[in-house]
Amino acid sequence: MRARFSLLPLRLSDVVFTVGPRRIIDGISLQLDAGLRTVIIGPNGAGKSVLLRLCHGLLRPTGGSIDWNAPEIAGGARRQAMVFQRPVLLRRSALGNVTYALKLANVPMGEREERALEALRKVGLEAYANHSARVLSGGEQQRLALARVWALRPEVLFLDEPTASLDPGATQEIEKVIEALHAAGTKIVLVTHNLGQASRLGDEILFLHQGRLVERAPADRFLKQPASLEAAKFLEGELPW
């Protein structure tokens, strides 16, 4: 049996993504390692969500390269996942949404329901297992999306503003799940517009501006004393969100 090598680090080398004449991502090079929770922030149009989609593989760069340490195994469960601001759910029960994801990942049929129920327990939705996913509240739907992730046990999780449309109570519940996933060993890469959330969930900050990686720093240092003029203006509210 071949050893299973870690996906990480993920290396981006001079990555460019263009739409027509516009460079959405403009020559970004960085390495994402295991362990640290990475939070990506920046003004509107900075390229945050596009960068996340490039890393996840939903988009392909028009220049440069994006390379995982080890390739994913064809036909096996994906070892990295993404959760969006608005979760994409099937017209099934909460349990059915999770078991279907496990089916696609080729998890044996006899393991799916138990594993799915455990994931629903982890996010506080066990009591809603047989409820239609479409009747759940916005916060519950987002927790269901995270339950699918938990059941798949990915090494890396990309999150694109997962609490942007949620109230403070629902946001707190989602943050608890993200913290628990991190504690279980999943690498977290999060885009957020919420500086409080960046402080709570981030170990390091990537600050993007006009498609460029302007600054990378420990979260506490960046939020208190940014090194770049663009970041200082952003934190002071002088750049649009």
Image (cartoon, rainbow, N blue to C red):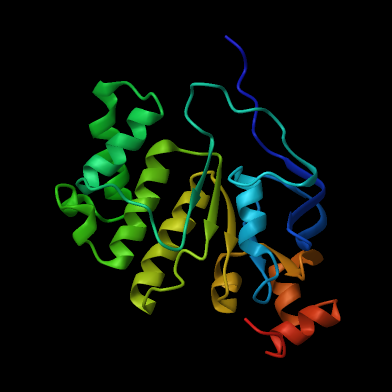
Q: Quadrant of residue 168?
A: bottom left
Say if 79 sits above or below 40 in the image. above
Q: How many marks?
A: 0
Residue 15 in sight here: yes
Q: Judge left or right: residue 93 versus residue 66.
A: left
In percent of width and height, residue 222 lies at 75, 74
Above or below, 132 against 165 in this view is above
Residue at position x 40%, y 44% in the image:
150
Residue 235 percent coordinates (x, y): 70, 84
Nearest to the observer: residue 227 or residue 66? 66
In the displayed structure, 100 sits above or below 146; it is above
Residue 25, position in %: x, y?
75, 59
Tell me which corner region of the image, top left, top right, bottom left or bottom right, holds residue 153. top left
Q: Nearer the viewer, residue 188 or 58?
A: 58
User: Which quadrant is home to the N terminus?
Assistant: top right
Q: Residue furthest front?
A: 20
Q: Name the quadrant of the C terminus.
A: bottom right
Does residue 225 appear in this view?
Answer: no
Residue occupying image coordinates x 23% and y 33%: 113
Task: Give left or right: position of 63 versus 80.
Answer: right
Image check: 192 left or right of 55?
left
The outermost residue toward the top is 1
